[in-house]
Image (cartoon, rainbow, N blue to C red):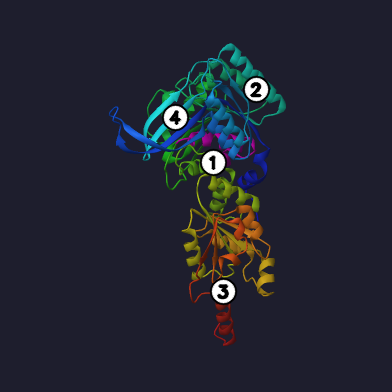
Amino acid sequence: MRNTKSTQFLTEDIQKLRIAVIGDVMLDRYIYGEVKRISPEAPVPVNRVRRMESVLGGAGNVAANLAGLGVQVYAAGVTGPDEHREALEEKMAAAGIDFSGLLPMMGRRTITKMRIIGARQQMLRLDFEEPGDLTPEEEERLLDWLEKRLQAGLDGIVLSDYAKGVCSDHFCQTVIALAHSAQVPVLVDPKGADWRKYAGCDFITPNVKEMCEAGGKVVPNETEPLVELASKARDDFHIKNVVVTRSEKGVSLINRNEVITEAATARDVFDVSGAGDTVAAVLLAAVAGGLSLGDALNLSNKAAGIVVSKVGTYPVHREELLREVLACEEREGRDYRPLSWDEVTSLARTWQAAGEKIVFTNGCFDILHTGHVTYLEQASRLGQHLIVGVNTDASVKRLKGETRPLNQENDRARILAALACVDAVVLFGEDTPAELIRRIRPDILVKGGDYKPEEVAGREYAGRVEILPFKEGYSTTGVIRKIAELVKEGKL
């Protein structure tokens, strides 16, 4: 199988990268409840709280995206020494983010946005923050931290500006100068109309509204007028690449030599929150990892498509992005490969962490027929994601005899992966998939036929076992027997 540059980058190179994210780190908190009555104390709804969750926001979401891709991330900024800081530390530690550059400073509050949600409707937002430019002490400590990190080695820096104070004019210019002295690229996620403080950066990633603000002119979300604004800003502020995120119209990269536009990939858009953070994270990582600008933009656009199909702030994960890249390669007729055990295990953890149920089944699937498809469709309806384990050629020979399989393992896997009901395909060479099931730990293990649940291999590693009947009149053995009879009768 031939790996493309993007698949090689995601499977081999990305985990070697070291990227610093500097800026306004925030904590996003969500309180979910239900509203059934009005308070007797005041004319306001009473929200009965059902659950609470916290995620990394602002520059923290950029860091979370990079960490989800497997990059070694170093986060820097300022917070208060408060309980919200403790929650930030917990989230960053769980994501594997180094937060040694995140300074707890007296007189600051950890920027926190708390959203009260009742019956899927946001009722209220509470902001905890004390915005203000860095003090001389804070700036000195952050720059000292950055210099040490650059000496230890960095492959890129993201400046994530949410206009809360960290990205002051002098600080941004000093960071860009230090990075360029060390030959490290800088990407800026901007805020506000004045881009002088970002002058000289390698990449800047405004959305359409921010591009219009910086250009001093409102233009429609169309390529020609946006390229005109971006080109002027590029020349005025000596920025190498302007990357405009354009919602449903995708993303465009404009530099002195070319304009590259990638159409949006998401089929269902539920929430655009954090999509710009995802583009920034994936774009810089891809460029730092050696991909061309075109490949890097394509990859970041695919990542944004994944994120906007989720609800709330959601950092993309390497396995999800790899799966999307492989699916696109398959649709484009390029060489296909099933996922590795490590990739499918990591993908399963990602889905389960999002509260989504995983269904697993397995088989040889030598000649795919209606019985197989009906069975797989029934299995997929039991959860949100269906993973199919496929016996390798050697395994099929041991189980079915020397004349089998008729189709080799990658071809069988590719046909299954093309089914809309199948989310991932993985090969296993053992006589049973018990070890693979132990790795994946599906919520539901499905077996077809007249098995009893206690007879199913790997059952101890699944949440529960479901036995589904096969569709009568269909079997691979039957198909092979019929072909053999036709050949024997000279009819084929």
What separation in Å lies between label 2 and label 4 (alpha carbons)? Answer: 30 Å
For badge 1, the amino acid type reads: Val
> On the image, which quarter does residue 288 sit in?
top right
Query: Is disc 3 placed on a helix, strand or loop?
Result: helix
Residue 290 lies, with reference to residue 27, above or below; the image says below
Query: Is label 2 in contact with label 1 (beta carbons under 8 Å)?
Result: no
For badge 4, the amino acid type reads: Met
**Front residue of 103 and 179:** 103
**Front residue of 16 and 78:** 78
Give the residue number, with chain letter if any, for mark 2.
Answer: 146
Residue 322 is left or right of residue 226, and the answer is right
Query: Is disc 4 placed on a helix, strand or loop?
Result: strand
> On the image, which quarter does residue 452 sit in?
bottom right
Give the residue number, with chain letter if any, for mark 3.
Answer: 476
**Badge number at residue 459:** none
Region of the chain picked out in magenta, as a range:
273-296
Q: How many marks?
A: 4
Q: Earlier in the sequence, mark 3 or mark 1?
A: 1
Residue 488 lies, with reference to residue 234, above or below; the image says below
Q: Earlier in the sequence, mark 4 or mark 3?
A: 4
What separation in Å lies between label 2 and label 1 (alpha carbons)? Answer: 26 Å
Q: Earlier in the sequence, mark 4 or mark 1?
A: 4
Give the residue number, with chain letter if any, for mark 4.
Answer: 114
